């Protein structure tokens, strides 16, 4: 359907793409990935024709439609309602509707029912009505409302003017319009940036059943894993394609680089040997002809490119935080209402008078729909948002708070490095400043850029880097992963995993939340529901609750806990047969005790498994040695090559047999422990 053929494109004197090729067919879900600056957005703009390449072409069939959602909000009439903007998707149906009304009026005015003109009017209105019905024009309003509500709009929002909404909500309206158009090729540039978790999940389900081809740019690993069946990676002016989702791409990419490294090393050895031969014998008359032949063979040789250097391992660790008391924060009788403005009704955010408690070492994910009160609660906990109730901070608690608005208060005359150093309170922090800036995509001369020339995303990353230099034992982070690429997110994620303090993070990045959070707080309907067991447990429990609500399953005891209301825990369901789900910490502890008691019965099986594992390690080590030899093309000229090939095949067979025995023992052990 879509063919990108031999595209070459320059930005100034930099070659961004060289002979780049990409193909997309109906049903393809392609994730376009690569480091910042690799050209992901530029490629989408080349596909749409907004940019023209120096060489090559982009083609698709003449009857194919292409839809493109850009990162930045396009111009939109702010006086239109949200629903009107989305309904612009039905341009043809809207025109047909007007034509049908016009034709109907003409028919009503006709008196000569036997004339040719009257018959022509009937034919025209029939054709228009048939086409209108085919486009489901009668359902366009219902479909628009369903789409907008799926993307997070409330029913009462739909008739409000666009001017009342932020850029993120305007982007949602444009996304709704694009999806309603149902183009054959859908190009999405960071579609989840302005969506909350519920809306992202809705979009996933919608796109999974989409009829055409989808190419999307995203730094959301969770979204990519659920959405795509192929990855196209931009690096070094080229594109590399892989099958499967993002996790599968990582494995294939590593294997590809390893294989390329072997081939490259073998070729380099061959080149070195040939060059030594030429250098040694080029002056000898008896060997000159052979030397010249080798020179020609080198000139004709198709050189294997050196494999990409693995990206430098970036990492940072938080300064060792001072130890706080066991209870970090207590909130009693949480109530929050924003007063009315301009005759608008007051906004009731927290209505239940809840009690909340945060303990030392908690890693809390704060989630909920946009507008539910996540950021409000984060500001309350930080102490800079008034509320009705009481809050008590624990012993020796030192807080650090990050929010996107901090990017707006940077000193514009300073450089990136100067601004960072100004926020580093210790010599250790100042020494770590360049490292942490590198983690957040400020490398090389970027650190000397004046803040005045930074984009909004760059300012946000700098504000985050500054925040993390502050020594604290309680981090409050409001959307910390916005504007970060996947590698930078993983650097932050690892630092949070290693951090011994307490964290509360507002985020819609589910991979980030799933990896670091031990508890999920969901804000909705004026209260906070607490799920102990991490994000995977939260997902399972929410699904179960939804099924219970719809009457699909029996009510079962909750492993989560409702936040306290007026000092009392929310009531739990009566005991019923347990539904299988993620295990809580208590379940794991009890199972560990059970396994300990039955240890004497399982020691023999464990010993067998250990023996198998030792043998597997030996065979794997020998296999690796043989593969290094066999990767060298010159090795096959040696007499021992055949023996090595034979030994490698035997080891493969032994490994397969031994692993089968180990698996059998593992299953037996699991059954005994069960």
Image (cartoon, rainbow, N blue to C red):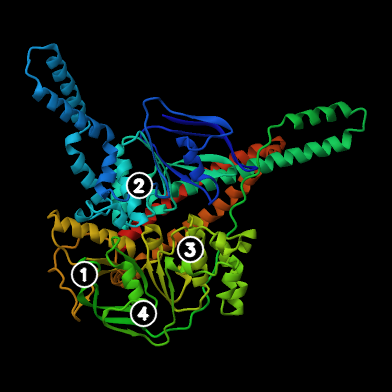
Residue at mark 2: 76
Q: Is residue 644 above or below residue 200?
A: above
- Decide which of tag 4 and tag 2 comes sooner along the chain: 2
Image side of residue 616 versus residue 448, left or right: left
Give how far across and how far down residue 349 sits, in percent. Answer: 24, 70
Q: Please report the residue visible at 53 percent of the width from the left and 52 percent of the height from the top.
A: 36
- Decide which of tag 1 and tag 3 comes sooner along the chain: 1
Q: CA distance from mark 1 to mark 4?
A: 22 Å
Q: Which mark is residue 346?
A: 1
Give how far across and how far down residue 283 sits, in percent. Answer: 92, 33
- Disc 3 is placed on an element classified as helix
- Decide which of tag 1 and tag 2 comes sooner along the chain: 2
Q: Please report the residue visible at 54 percent of the width from the left and 70 percent of the height from the top.
A: 411
Q: CA distance from mark 1 to mark 2?
A: 29 Å
Give how far across and how far down residue 329 sits, in percent. Answer: 34, 81
Front position among marks 4 and 2: 2
Q: Is residue 360 above or below residue 347?
A: below
- Disc 1 is placed on an element classified as loop
**Is the residue marked by circle 4 packed among few (<14), some (14-19), or many (20+) residues within 10 Å?**
few
Outermost residue toward the bottom?
Answer: 395
Residue at mark 3: 460
Give how far across and how far down residue 652 sits, in percent. Answer: 52, 44
Front position among marks 3 and 2: 2
Q: CA distance from mark 3 to mark 2?
A: 26 Å
Q: CA distance from mark 1 to mark 3?
A: 31 Å
Q: CA distance from mark 4 to mark 2?
A: 38 Å
């Amino acid at each position: 359907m879509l063919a990108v053929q031999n595209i070459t494109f320059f930005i100034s004197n930099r070659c961004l793409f060289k002979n780049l090729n990409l193909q997309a067919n109906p049903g393809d879900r392609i994730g376009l990935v690569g480091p910042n600056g690799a050209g992901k957005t530029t490629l989408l703009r080349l596909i749409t024709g907004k940019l023209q390449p120096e060489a090559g072409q982009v083609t698709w069939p003449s009857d194919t439609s292409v839809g493109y959602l850009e990162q930045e909000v396009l111009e939109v009439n702010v006086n239109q309602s949200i629903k009107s903007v989305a309904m612009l998707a039905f341009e043809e149906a809207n025109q047909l509707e007007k034509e049908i009304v016009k034709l109907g009026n003409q028919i009503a005015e006709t008196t000569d029912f036997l004339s040719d003109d009257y018959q022509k009017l009937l034919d025209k209105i029939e054709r228009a009505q048939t086409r209108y019905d085919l486009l489901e024009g009668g359902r366009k309003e219902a479909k628009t409302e369903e789409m907008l509500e799926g993307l997070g709009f409330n029913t009462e929002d739909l008739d409000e003017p666009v001017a009342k909404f932020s850029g993120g909500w305007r982007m949602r309206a444009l996304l709704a319009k694009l999806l309603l158009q149902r183009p054959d090729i859908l190009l999405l540039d960071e579609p989840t940036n302005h969506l909350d978790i519920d809306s992202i999940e809705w979009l996933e389900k919608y796109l999974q059943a989409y009829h055409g081809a989808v190419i999307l740019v995203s730094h959301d690993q969770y979204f990519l894993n659920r959405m795509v069946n192929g990855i196209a990676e931009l690096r070094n002016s080229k594109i590399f394609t892989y099958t499967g989702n993002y996790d599968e791409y990582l494995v294939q990419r590593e294997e590809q680089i390893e294989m390329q490294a072997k081939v490259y090393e073998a070729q380099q050895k061959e080149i070195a040997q040939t060059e030594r031969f030429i250098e040694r014998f080029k002056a000898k008359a008896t060997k000159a002809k052979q030397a010249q032949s080798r020179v020609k063979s080198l000139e004709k040789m198709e050189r294997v490119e050196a494999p990409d250097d693995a990206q430098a391992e970036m990492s940072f660790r938080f300064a060792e935080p001072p130890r706080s008391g066991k209870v970090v924060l207590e909130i009693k009788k949480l109530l929050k209402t924003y007063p009315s403005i301009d005759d608008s009704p007051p906004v009731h955010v927290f209505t239940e008078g809840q009690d909340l408690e945060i303990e030392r070492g908690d890693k809390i994910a704060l989630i909920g729909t946009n507008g539910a009160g996540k950021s409000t609660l984060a500001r309350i906990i930080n102490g800079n948002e008034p509320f009705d109730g009481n809050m008590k901070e624990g012993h020796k608690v030192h807080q650090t708070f990050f929010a996107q608005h901090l990017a707006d208060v940077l000193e514009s005359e300073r450089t990136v490095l100067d601004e960072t150093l100004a926020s580093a309170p210790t010599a250790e922090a100042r020494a770590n400043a360049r490292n942490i800036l590198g983690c957040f995509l400020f490398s090389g001369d970027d650190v000397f850029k004046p803040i005045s020339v930074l984009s909004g995303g760059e300012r946000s990353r700098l504000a985050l880097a500054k925040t993390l230099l502050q020594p604290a034992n309680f981090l409050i982070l409001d959307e910390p992963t916005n504007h970060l690429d996947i590698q930078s997110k993983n650097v932050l994620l690892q630092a949070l995993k290693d951090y011994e303090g307490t964290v509360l993070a507002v985020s819609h990045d589910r991979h980030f939340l799933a990896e670091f959070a031990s508890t999920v707080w969901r804000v909705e309907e004026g209260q906070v529901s607490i799920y102990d067991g991490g994000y995977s447990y939260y997902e399972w429990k929410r699904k179960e609750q939804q099924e219970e609500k719809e009457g699909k399953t029996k009510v079962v005891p909750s492993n989560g806990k409702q936040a306290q209301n007026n000092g009392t825990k929310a009531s739990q369901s009566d005991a019923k047969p347990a539904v299988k789900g993620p295990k809580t910490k208590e379940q794991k502890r009890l199972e560990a005790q059970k396994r300990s008691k039955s240890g004497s019965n399982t020691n023999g099986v464990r010993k067998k498994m250990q023996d198998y594992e030792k043998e597997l390690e030996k065979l794997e080590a020998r296999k690796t040695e043989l593969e290094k030899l066999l990767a060298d093309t010159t090795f096959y000229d040696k007499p021992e090559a055949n023996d090595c090939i034979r030994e490698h095949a035997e080891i493969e067979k032994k490994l397969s047999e031994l692993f089968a025995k180990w698996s059998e023992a593992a299953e037996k052990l699991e059954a005994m422990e069960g």
